[in-house]
Image (spheres, rainbow, N blue to C red):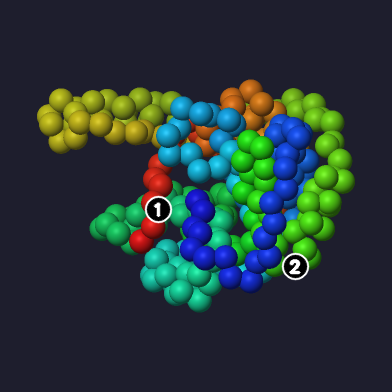
Amino acid sequence: MVKSLVTHHYRTATFPLASLPDFKRTAFEWAQSFSQTCYLDSNEYSADLHRSYECLIGADACETISLPATGNAFDRWKQFCETHPTWQFGYLSYDLKNEVEALQSAHPDRLGFPVLHFFVPVYVLEVFTDRVVIHSRRESPRAVWQLIRKSRQRPASEVPALPSLRARTPRQEYLQTVEAIRRHIVEGDLYEMNLCQEFYAEDCFLDPGDVFQQLNQLAQAPFAAFLKLHDRHLLCASPERFLKKEGD
């Protein structure tokens, strides 16, 4: 998720692109060198009438809001936005539903991501098919441009063999849940439901950046995303937009 209001404290310049694919690869390598970064890729999906960018990157963090648990999260984020009315990259987690409805989740959290996390980036790259607009709070945009161009594209490493994925929900329990949902649909209690379950593997050692690059090359999803939050990573190859809001 990206929130953009005004661009206080940024210096901005535009540079032409000779090769969009090459620039995106080098920009990704440069961006993931920071402890916090967010890389959003449209993969040249021209059928999306509401697309704003070919690629959008926020790198490094000068201000951060990170909430470990629910409880007035939206009010605290609103205060953060009022204090920092500028670019923000981050996410809202599913459990924030507990703050807008009378709901409560009791599922164990084995990953430890904050329920809400946004950062004000030091650098923002607005990438279009033929140019990139660089916003920088630190060195000049031209210096950033030169650093990105000098970034080496690492050859993709082979993804190591993974342990077998395991379902968190036992098979019989899952099937019983499916039958219960079918009964609710027949009785008219609901007409649609997304039943999700977690699959996981332990003791696997991966380079998240390499895995994302290979995933993105295979899927070429219009809403591909890579988020690095220190030692935690989110990789996304989504075919659909959840929500877009423009203006006030």
Asked which quadrant contains residue 161, the reply is top right
| Residue 32 seen | no
* Amino acid bearing label 1: Glu
Q: Is residue 140 left or right of residue 167?
A: right
Q: CA distance from mark 1 to mark 2?
A: 28 Å
Side of 4 relative to 59 (left or right): left
Q: Secondary structure at mark 1?
A: loop
Task: Indicate the amino acid at tag 2.
Answer: Arg
Closest to the observer: 100 or 82?
82
Q: Quadrant of residue 121?
A: bottom right
Is the residue 193 above or below the residue 58 in the image?
above
Per the image, the residue denoted by label 1 is: 246
Residue drawn at (83%, 52%), measured in percent from left and top?
A: 147
Q: Locate residue 132 relative to residue 157 in the image: left or right.
A: left
User: Which residue is at the front of the view, 34 or 86?
Assistant: 86
Q: Which mark is residue 138?
A: 2
Residue 147 has which mark?
none
Could you say where residue 191 lies in the image, as x and y percent from the top left? Answer: 20, 31
Quadrant where the C terminus is found in the figure: bottom left
The image position of residue 225, as x and y in percent, is 58, 41
Identify the residue at image location x=54%, y=55%: 90
- Residue 182 versus residue 200 in the image, above or below: above
Taking the spot 64% from the left edge, 30% from the top edge, the residue there is 216
Q: Secondary structure at mark 2?
A: loop
